[in-house]
Image (tube, rainbow, N blue to C red):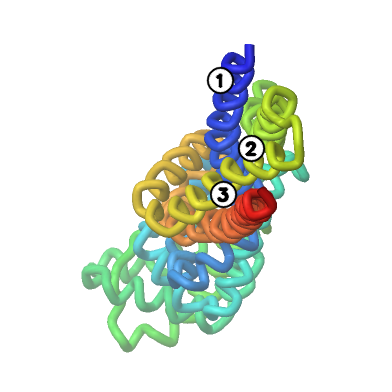
Amino acid sequence: MDTLRKTIAALCAMLFTISSLLALLAFNIEWYAFDANVYKQAFERQNLYARAPEILANALLGYISENQNADPYLKELTLEDWQETIAAIVPPEELKVLTDSALDSVFDYLNDRTDSVEISLLPIKGRLTGPGGVEIVQKILRAQPACTVEQLLQIGMGFLAGDIALCNPPPEMAGLVQPLIQSQLQLMTLSIPDKLTLISSTPGDPRANLRQVRTLMTITPVFPLLFLFGLTIFAVRSLMDWLQWWGYPFLITGATSILTALVGVASLGILIQGILESFWVGLVPLILFAALREALSAVTGEILRPVFFEGIILAAIGLSMVLTSLLISYRNSRRI
């Protein structure tokens, strides 16, 4: 009977160690992987804010290509044109604010604080109607083939009426072209919305499965507590039993957690990235997905850092209990 009791206790100790390590990882993934501030720090460290023009350009191009009422001139602009335009007319500090706002919107959506992911276009609209917008349009025109005689005759009508034929007018026509560009820019900005909705909730909300997984992650610490309770029931009969049966599992769990955080960054990072990417399918806008995926290596470090310190705490508790039990055993042996 005593052998069976200790066998069950040993099984509980082993399951406690395994479930504790999994709980530390799962709980910290849930805590840090869905925090926008963690990704903002990662964007800062890895200079991912430089991707902002690409993100905004993709969002604009997608909207314009799908909107039949969009200005014809806008439809002539390529992804590269939009990227160059946004990078040229919107200062880096404003691009950073726009990117942070987009990240906040994504994680507010993932955390059920809102029902959509939105990105603001107001800074772009404001800058397009200024001197920067005119300069960009002129730059685009200079990259086009030289205007034919027919195009030169129609260029005024084209810019004002929307029948656009992009070409490079001669320098002597600059005085005529610039006011036409300015008037066209005013019309263009009217067809650009103040904000774009990248994702909105639907009747089959894909966040439902994510909620279930995250709920499971938050309750993972319950499982090692249950195994610790079972271990206590079957093994602890005295102070020495308690110090030894708790001390060694705590020490092993802590040491394993420390080792995992230090040595397992590369392999564990791949695992965590795979888990997070699977969460994001259908939940994160594709135009942001690539940048967020690049940030995952830094986010993995943020997840493993608390695992390391929590492992130190567990190892310290376990070691102190083991040393106390050894000290008591030593004193009892001296008395004998």
Image coords of residue 250 (percent x, y) = 61, 46
* Residue 198 in sight from this viewpoint: no
Q: Tell me whether the residue at label 2 lies in contact with that at label 1, contact meaning CB atoms closer than 8 angstroms.
A: no
Which of the 4 image quadrants contains residue 116? Answer: top right
Tell which of 258 and 138 is nearer to you. 258
Seen in the picture, residue 139 relative to 262 is either above or below; the reply is: below
Give the number of the mark in front: 3 or 1.
1
Residue at x 56%, y 51% (from the top left corner): 254
Q: Is residue 262 left or right of residue 218?
A: left
* Residue 7: mark: 1
Which of the 4 image quadrants contains residue 221? Answer: top right
Q: Secondary structure at mark 3?
A: helix
Seen in the picture, residue 260 relative to 82 is either above or below; the reply is: above
Residue at x 56%, y 72% (from the top left corner): 95
Q: Residues within 10 Å of mark 2 (few under 14, many from 20)?
A: many
Can you identify the residue that label 3 sits on? Answer: 251
Seen in the picture, residue 191 relative to 93 is either above or below; the reply is: above
* Residue 101 in sight from this viewpoint: yes
Seen in the picture, residue 285 relative to 81 is either above or below; the reply is: above
Q: Residues within 10 Å of mark 3 (few under 14, many from 20)?
A: many
Q: Amino acid at mark 3?
A: Leu
Q: Tell me whether the residue at label 3 lies in contact with that at label 1, contact meaning CB atoms closer than 8 angstroms.
A: no
Tell which of 53 and 331 is nearer to you. 331
Can you identify the residue that label 2 sits on? Answer: 245
